[in-house]
Amino acid sequence: MADANLHAIGRRKEAVCRVYLRPGSGKWEINGRALGDYFPRPTLVSSIQLPLSATDNLGKWDVMANLNGGGVTGQAGALRLAIARALVKQDETYKPKLRELGLLTRDARAVERKKPGRPKARKRFQFSKR
């Protein structure tokens, strides 16, 4: 199955990522741009590459991703989850290692909704004694 293209979906906050992995030289294309161009922060780049480096696959797969919604950090988290899921599809033996690092867990934290009669989700109006 190593010669087949892999597809997976990752989500984080409001961001959704569809990732396609194919055997190659380690080329990255995210919404038509290179990895360093799309994510200028080195911490996000290393976080995104963590599933590949943890399984010794860095530079063995060409990554093509479509990202929609959310902000920079949410999109990075969605891409990381999608890559980890695609690697598990390719080889089930990666699952314990990726699970141990917490890379297969969908981070469900999202913005809390605004409640009626409140200025924000939790903020109260200013108290007035008189």
Image (tube, rainbow, N blue to C red):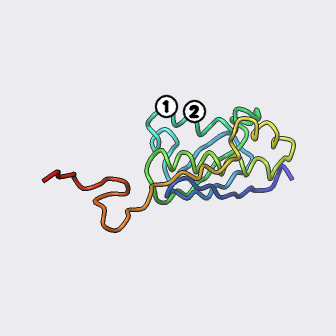
Label 2: few (<14), some (14–19) or many (≥20) C-alpha neighbours in 10 Å: few
- The image shows residue 14 at horizontal and vertical percentages of 49, 58
Question: Are the residues flagged by discs 1 and 2 in contact, CB closer than 8 Å?
Answer: yes
- The image shows residue 101 at horizontal and vertical percentages of 71, 35
At a point 38% along the width and 64% down the height, the residue shown is: 115
Q: Is residue 85 left or right of residue 39?
A: right
Q: Give whichever of 42, 1 is nearer the camera.
A: 42
Mark 1 and mark 2: Cα distance apart in space: 6 Å
Q: Give whichever of 50, 128 is nearer the camera.
A: 128
Disc 1 element: helix
Of all residues shown, which one is farthest toward the front?
A: 130
Q: Give, as a three-letter code, the residue at label 1.
A: Pro
Q: Is residue 14 left or right of residue 50?
A: left
Q: Which residue is mark 2?
A: 46
- The image shows residue 110 at horizontal and vertical percentages of 50, 54
Q: Which mark is residue 73?
A: none
At a point 67% along the width and 46% down the height, the residue shown is: 62
Q: Give whichever of 40, 32 is nearer the camera.
A: 40
Q: Is residue 88 left or right of residue 73?
A: right
Give the total of numbered labels.
Answer: 2
Residue 111 lies, with reference to residue 26, above or below; the image says: below
Q: Give, as a three-letter code, the residue at label 2.
A: Ser
Label 1: few (<14), some (14–19) or many (≥20) C-alpha neighbours in 10 Å: few
Disc 2 element: helix
- The image shows residue 39 at horizontal and vertical percentages of 47, 41
At a point 64% along the width and 51% down the height, the residue shown is: 106
At a point 54% along the width and 36% down the height, the residue shown is: 45
Residue 110 lies, with reference to residue 114, above or below; the image says: above
Of all residues shown, which one is farthest toward the bottom?
A: 116
Q: Which residue is mark 1?
A: 42
